[in-house]
Amino acid sequence: MRVVSIDGDGQTAEQLRLIEASRPEVAQGHVLIRTACAGVNRPDILQRRGLYPPPPGASPVLGLEVSGTIDSVGAGVEGWKAGDTVCALVNGGGYAEYVSVDARHLLPVPKGLTLEEAGSLPETVLTVYANLMEHGALKSGETVLVHGGNSGIGSMTIQMGKAIGAKVVATARGADKCAFAKSLGADLVIDSDAGDFVTPVKDFGGADVVLDIVAGDFVAKNLLCLNFRGRMVQVGTSRSSSVEIDLRRIMQKQAVLTGSMLRPRSPDEKARLTAAVRAHVWPLIEAGRIRPVIDRVFAFADVAAAHAYMDSGAHKGKVVLKL
Ligand SMILES: NC(=O)c1ccc[n+]([C@@H]2O[C@H](COP(=O)([O-])OP(=O)(O)OC[C@H]3O[C@@H](n4cnc5c(N)ncnc54)[C@H](OP(=O)(O)O)[C@@H]3O)[C@@H](O)[C@H]2O)c1
């Protein structure tokens, strides 16, 4: 089968190549998926550049989410059969024609969605659900502030927040990306390149939850925006992972500062999250209240172009590889 390999230090997208490799074995409790589409996520870029190594035991091949057709089913798997169309969170190995997946991490393709759309969902939806709904404990009527409203994570956060009845404030950089975030349903969008976001967020009524993918100097500002007993949830650190904050504000506001990573979670924990997403988010997708937001689909052979496109930062929403 063809898989994507990194020919060099991964600093540039041009170093991605398709090579031949043997198909993965189907372990007990796993299924082998014939990949139709693989979502491209920022963590793939970080892994390519050596900044996000795969955890022990994970495939070294890039790719954290796929859609496709079940080719074969391992011992002990119930409820799935060869020929089923599915999408799945994978522990690496998504940029390949076949990938072995823990059957508990499978989701059906939501009714009415294409395989391109389904392949863009699992990593993003599980990350947003875990951080917005579980760690952030966002409730209907509350307000969430999300940075990078144009990103894969941001575009899903805006939609999930609105779908559960919350108010959503998003930041993005530049008028075009702000307009995109607004089109997804954000109540207020602030151009973080044009000025400070703290005053507009406070004028809006403050934030009960902040989902932050950038960190750095934004963290102290997030704390200023936070309402009493608010929750700040960190899922990325693209500005900087070292920050200075005034801890007295955490005490005054009885605030919670937390965060999480999806990939290092145990298979059992990912299975629990997958089941929660199937129960709580899949119906919202099938009802059309949350939709996949795909910017571009690239052919598998054009994986280097797909990464170069994401490297450029020009995308809005998700980038997908079609095999
Ligand atoms: N914790 C987890 O489990 C988990 C899982 C998945 C993803 N993530 C993280 O979540 C983040 C988003 O992932 P994604 O796949 O949605 O990526 P993406 O679509 O490439 O989005 C990246 C976003 O970050 C913004 N950004 C980057 N640098 C910035 C800066 N210095 N200041 C302000 N904004 C900046 C970008 O803004 P522009 O468009 O203006 O450049 C864009 O909105 C990444 O940091 C990724 O590592 C974490």
Image (cartoon, rainbow, N blue to C red):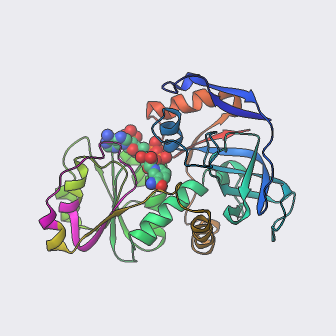
Foreground pick, 3 / 196 = 3
Q: Which residues are magenta?
A: 223-249
Does residue 74 appear to the left or right of 118 in the view shown?
right
Quadrant including the N terminus: top right
- The quadrant of the picture showing ligand 1 is top left
Foreground pick, 146 / 233 = 233
- Residue 281: where, in percent of width, then height? 57, 69
Q: Is residue 174 visible?
A: no
**Tally of numbered discs:** 0
- Residue 185: where, in percent of width, then height? 43, 60
- Residue 121: where, in percent of width, then height? 60, 55
Q: Residue at x 66, y 39 (%)?
A: 321
Q: Residue at x 29, y 43 (%)?
A: 240
Foreground pick, 221 / 78 = 78
Per the image, is 133 magenta? no
Q: Is residue 289 visible?
A: yes
Foreground pick, 85 / 6 = 6
Quadrant including the C terminus: top right
Does residue 265 appear to the left or right of 214 in the view shown?
right
- Residue 222: where, in percent of width, then height? 24, 58
Q: Quadrant of residue 267?
A: bottom right
Per the image, is 247 magenta? yes
